[in-house]
Image (cartoon, helix red, strand yellow):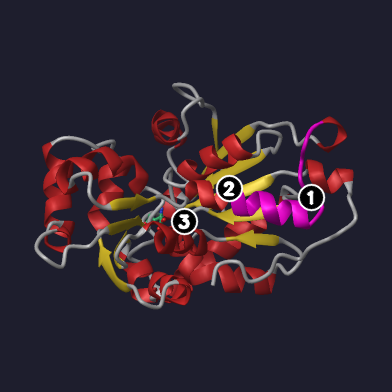
Amino acid sequence: MDNPRANPVNTLDHKRCARPIGVFDSGVGGLTVAAALRRRLPAESLLYLGDAARLPYGTKAPTTIIQYVLKAAGFFMAHDIKMMVLACNTASAHAAAALALHYPEMMVLGVIDSGAERAALQSSGGRIVVAATEGTCRSGAFDHAILARRPDASVRPVPCPLFVALVEEGLTEGPIAEAMIRQYLGDSFAGPDAADCLVLGCTHFPLLAGALRKVLGDGPALVDCAEAVAERAAAMLAEGGALAEGGENAGGGGITLFTTDAPERFSASAGRFFPGLGQRPPVELIDL
Ligand code: DGL
């Protein structure tokens, strides 16, 4: 469940429309979702927070993740956001419900349902592998969300924890990335029962798409939730009368980047995840 409460408001409120959307991840991975939001909703202002000081989230306990996400939400609330997008599957799997409970006035959008919806549509034979963090796999969130849409499917979550480090380090192509992909996923995509669909169940993983194609071939569908999340965000904002469309409803269209550790490092890799950000975008260091 990653969209427990949308809190719709039906009267158009220009001030509400102009408020920013908060986008959250443990690191730079969620910028893949922020980039899709920018493409789909160019008039919206985005605040992006990557909690680099506490990365990785994928190996941590659910209660710890909930604590971190609530802190991030407090930061966003102080910046008067109108919606928080959990651009992190691990956070969506563990903390979306707690977030909606603590901040009932805030629209909350996670990424699991969008990925599951795409997988259910894109898988030809229903043999679906979900590559994700240990925490996301353990939560069963994808199994549940995919089977609710496609009960005939077989869903196999495969923890791929080292993919996060590879992507954070910029090692998204070449022999190391390919060996890692073979190690984690080779067996699932070989033989007569080979899977036909791979869900990129971590927002860092779309950057591995080239290497994944090279190792797994053109056969399997690769499911990235980013575009579907942006579509859902647009629908929720429209339904809530909070869409920034231009004119007096314009949010401004910019993106402001925040991180909890090493802003120069964050800045150096941000452009790989969000084309158009430039070489070294400004990143503000914050303490949660
Ligand atoms: N990008 C996050 C996700 O989608 C996880 C990375 C981490 O382990 O912190 O799950």
159 and 279: which one is in front?
159
227 above or below 283? below
Q: Secondary structure at mark 1?
A: loop
Q: Is residue 159 magenta?
A: no
In 3D space, how far apart are the residues under numbered discs 3 and 1 (Cα atoms)? 23 Å
| Type of amino acid at the residue the image marks with label 1 | Ala
Distance from mark 1 CB to nearest ligand 1 atom below 8 Å: no
Badge 1 local density, few (<14 within 10 Å), some, or many (20+)?
many
Q: Earlier in the sequence, mark 2 or mark 3?
A: 3
Please say whether residue 123 is visible from this viewpoint: yes
Asked if labels 1 and 3 touch by Cβ distance under 8 angstroms, the answer is: no
Left or right: residue 252 versus residue 12 is: left
Image disc number at residue 93: none
Q: Is residue 236 magenta?
A: yes
Q: Residue furthest front?
A: 124
Left or right: residue 195 versus residue 66 is: left
In 3D space, how far apart are the residues under numbered discs 2 and 3 (Cα atoms)? 14 Å
Q: Residue at x 89, y 50 (%)?
A: 12
107 and 55: which one is in front?
107
71 above or below 148? above
Q: Which residue is mark 3?
A: 88
In 3D space, how far apart are the residues under numbered discs 2 and 1 (Cα atoms)? 15 Å
Badge 3 local density, few (<14 within 10 Å), some, or many (20+)?
many
Magenta-tinted stretch? 230-246
Q: Which residue is mark 1?
A: 242
| Type of amino acid at the residue the image marks with label 2 | Ala
Q: Residue at x 26, y 51 (%)?
A: 163
27 and 254: which one is in front?
254
Residue 240, position in %: x, y? 78, 57
Kindly report which numbered mark, 3 or 1, lies closer to the viewer in this rendering: 1
Please say whether residue 82 is visible from this viewpoint: no
Q: Which residue is mark 2?
A: 230
